[in-house]
Image (spheres, helix red, strand yellow):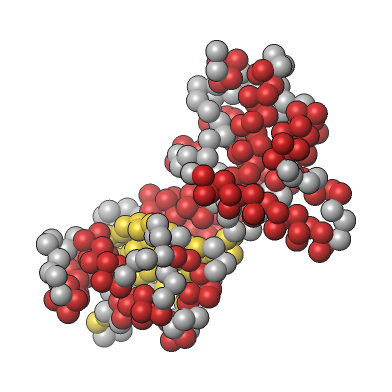
Amino acid sequence: MEYTEHFGLEREAFSNAPDARFYFDSEQHSQALVRFLRIVDSNKGLAVLVGGIGSGKTTLARRLLDTLSVDLYESSLLVMVHSGITPEWILTRIAMQLGVVNPAADRMTVLKQLYERLLEIEREGRRAVVLIDEAQMLQTRALMEEFRGLLNLEIPGKKLLNLIFFGLPEVEECLRLDEPLAQRVALRYYLHSLDEDSTVAYIKHRLQVAGAKNMLFSGPAVQLIYRYSGGVPRLINTLCDNCLFEAFMQKLPGVVPKIVQSIAGDLGLTDLKHVGTQNGVDQHLGKIEALLAKMEQKR
């Protein structure tokens, strides 16, 4: 028997695999979507979302992509998987994603093909949008210059392409590689960890989507999950998933504080309540970032 069956769940509630069904529309996620849609609809050109590891950047990027109706937008999502990406690859990939058929081998011809395609999209009354996830991987000045060049594809009074970067705080360093590009950022939005109330709502939401008939975590257990996770969604998922499995192994009807404490200890986490000063809180969150980085490397 799996723990999903033990707790009457239709599916795992706290998997870290992307799943649009589990999207949690927190206040800051809602605010981010409104702001990015405004940037796109007014053709501002470039916007950046910055967040720590596990804060939900990719989830938000996919949600924004789903929000962009094909009737109004020609949109795509590109994930930067490594730092060895070249300007030529970026240009060709964006051209293909926006509908250029058989991009040419040389850069200038691809640019001409892309410009013509962007004009087609404009004549259709739609807007071209490219979302770049893991944008902190764009670590060369040449790449930043390429993006600046793409933003120069315009007609009088109107840009033809909108770009939105989603990345770790290091994305700011990437932008500074080309100061003229950094100055073109029309919006920066910082995605923070969830607060305690939002953490409670997040856990309840995921359980409901998974088909839970009742709350499977006691109030004190949820408080501990927040304090150990620092409100980072990916770590909340990891803690909750392991806690449910442990409760299943112990044949318990739900998760109690001692289970959370045991799982958090296994993960090497510290209770946020015990770190004291703001410096201690920062160190705690840094420890969480380091743990999530290790988890990311194992994926």
Which one is in front, 67 or 182?
182
Question: Which residue is found at the position 78% from the left and 46% from the top?
Answer: 270
**Is 13 placed left or right of 43 in the picture?**
right
- Camera sees residue 15: yes
Instruction: Give above or below for 261 relative to 273.
Output: above
Q: Residue 8: where, in percent of width, then height?
A: 57, 17
Q: Residue 60: where, in percent of width, then height?
A: 48, 53
Count of marks overlaid on the render: 0
Please tell me in which quadrant of the rendered image residue 278 appears.
bottom right
Question: Which residue is found at the position 51% from the left and 55% from the top?
Answer: 57
Question: Which residue is found at the position 41% from the left and 65% from the top?
Answer: 83
Instruction: Give above or below for 282 relative to 154.
Output: above
- Camera sees residue 112: no
Q: Quadrant of the N terminus?
A: top right
Which one is in front, 182 or 214?
182
Please tell me in which quadrant of the rendered image residue 111 appears.
bottom left
Which one is in front, 19 or 158?
19
**Is 17 placed left or right of 125 in the picture?**
right
Question: Which residue is found at the position 47% from the left and 39% from the top?
Answer: 17
Q: Residue 196: where, in percent of width, then height?
A: 74, 46
Q: Residue 49: where, in percent of width, then height?
A: 51, 64
Instruction: Give above or below for 280 relative to 198.
Output: below
